[in-house]
Image (cartoon, rainbow, N blue to C red):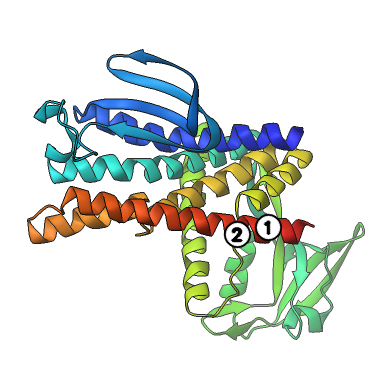
Amino acid sequence: MTTAVAAIVIFGILIFIHELGHFLVAKRAGILVHEFALGFGPKLFGFKRDGTEYALRLVPLGGFVRMAGMDPREEDVERHQSFQYKPLWQRMAVIFAGPFMNFVLAAVLFAAIFMFSGYPVASTTVQDVLPDRPAEDAGIETGDRIVAVDGRQIGSWNELVAEINANEGAPLVFTVERDGVTRDITITPERVDDRVLIGIAPQPVLERVGPVKAVTAGVEYTLRVTALIVTILGQIITNQAPLDVGGPVRIVSEIGLAAEQGVIMLLQLAAFLSINLGLFNLFPIPALDGSRLMFLAWEGITRRPINPEKENMFHLVGFALLLMLIVVITYNDILQLL
């Protein structure tokens, strides 16, 4: 029950924020929005306000913003309220706003985590000792806390790195604390590629930060995660990494596991899912925002709009293929869970 509730809430928030981006920019551009819906299928309930119907539909696996001018057969709308007659940059802004809001949501969630739980920073405690490196040869062990280098007190990981970088090839005396006892260990840093190191990895600790630092860190962390996902996708495309695709069933399973570990883990997973949703929608796949941006970009290059009926058919066929892909992935997810 907890898994189902958590999944519905998270999916609902991710979809709502995405569609809200389209909706707000469309309204700002003066486009008539016929419907703002969460879910697909039969309408459960809704209300109408300022020409827009707000609806909750039966199947909670998506949502949509139905704007005037998206259907080429629509005739009962004034030109200044139609999506297709707006300037190119406004139409691109409306489409891009959905994925963009997913990145904004991720940054907000990360900021909330950092503010209330703490921001992970590297400490001078050793979490890992890399094999065949100077630190291992000298006797550094996991759990050692480095408190001084050549008699100079070390208060942060950055200070430790600075000392190591400044002394390539020169032996340094590291004062470490192990099991409440301090001892001196001599280590000579070495250069590996473009870095000077001794072969240790720090143990992260959580540091409380204020709202400004939390927001800044949230944006930075969102960019880093996005870059990491893009890198992994590039490695998958070039066969440098295995293809590991999960669908709705697997995502719900992961949400259930995160819910069992607490609110922070659930928020963290929601942030990662939001980034993935934003990126996925920017791919030039039929029926997704990325393909619509692709058509608009082509219009900007050629100075000629794509035939709306042909474009809609392209999206319709793509949507059917996308649904088939989701069914296949869901089937594989169920087999893996069983």
Q: Secondary structure at mark 1?
A: helix
> Looking at the image, can residue 156 be seen?
no
For label 1, the residue is 333
Q: Is residue 207 visible?
A: yes
Please indicate whether residue 317 sits to the left or right of residue 132 in the image.
left
Q: Is residue 153 above or below residue 217?
A: below
The crowd level at tag 1 (other Cα within 10 Å; few <14, some 14-19, many 20+) is: some
Please tell me how crowded label 2 is: few (under 14), some (14-19), or many (20+) other residues with Cα within 10 Å. some
Instruction: Tell me the residue at 67%/40% (across/down).
Output: 266
Which of 124/247 is in front?
247
208 or 305: which is nearer to us? 305
Task: Say if mark 1 contacts mark 2, CB within 8 Å.
Answer: yes
Label 1, label 2: how far apart the Cα atoms are: 6 Å
In-image side of 112 versus 186 (left or right)? left
| Residue under pointer 2 | 329
For label 2, the SS is helix
Picture residue at 71% right of the left edge, 48% below the top: 253
